[in-house]
Image (cartoon, grey):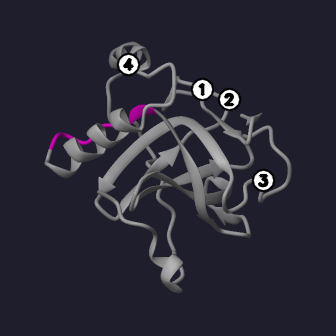
Amino acid sequence: MLPFPSFLRGVAATGLLCALAPSIAPAAYAQEAASLPPHCDNHDFMAKQQAFENGQPKTDVPVHICGRVIALSPKAKRTRSGWHGYFYVAVAPNISIRIVSGLDEMHAPAWPWVSKGDQVEVVGRYYFDSYRRQGIDWIHWGTGRSWPIPGYVIVNGTKYD
């Protein structure tokens, strides 16, 4: 399971943790969308995370998590796919996950629109490239060829998509 991010101990976090292509067949999207919990389900997320860490084939899957923001990058970063804001959400004691927000796609105020300590609910695409390269992205309203399930973030009761 992913521990708290290293920059909480004073080390800067670097790199973009985005999956650039889907790894499940389009026919499976309907099944995956149907498996999306209607309410926050951190246990479902952690089961998926554990399965990937144990060697299950790594596929992008929809998740619905909630928790408290424990850290964030105060400045947005420009990548080849646009502007992104990053924050970490604690889903259990000593377990957190990186949230990658595509700021060009989201209906939200200027970054940062989350603060340390905020309570959030996140629907998006969980990707697992490796133990150190995993996160939740596609947390915006749009869909596309690579991900047909719209996402969102609720911050202290305010929805951003």
**Amino acid type of disc 2?**
Trp
Marks 2, 4: nearer the viewer:
4
Label 3: few (<14), some (14–19) or many (≥20) C-alpha neighbours in 10 Å: few
User: Could you say whether the residue bearing mark 2 is in a helix, strand or loop?
Assistant: loop
Please tell me which of labels 2 and 1 falls first in the chain.
Answer: 2
| C-alpha separation, residue under disc 2 versus residue under disc 1 | 5 Å
Going 60% across and 38% down the picture, which residue do you hit?
Answer: 121
In the figure, residue 75 lies in which quadrant? bottom right
Instruction: Magenta stretch: give its range.
Output: 56-63
**Label 3 belongs to which residue?**
113
State the predominant SS element of the stretch in magenta. Answer: loop
The label number, if any, that marks residue 150 in the structure image: 1
Neighbours of disc 4 within 10 Å: few (<14), some (14-19), many (20+): few
First in sequence: mark 3 or mark 2?
Answer: 3
> Do labels 2 and 1 touch, CB within 8 Å?
yes
| Whole-percent x, y for residue 74 in the image | 72, 69
Left or right: 93 with respect to 103?
A: left
Q: Name the residue under label 2.
A: 141
Inter-mark Cα distance, 3 to 4: 29 Å
In the picture as drawn, the residue positioned furthest to the right comes out as 109
Residue farthest toward the left in the current orientation of the protein: 55
Dot placed on the residue nearer the N-terminal end, 3 or 4: 4
Q: Distance between the residues labelled 2 and 4?
A: 19 Å
* Mark 2 Cα-neighbour bin, 10 Å: few <14, some 14–19, many ≥20: some
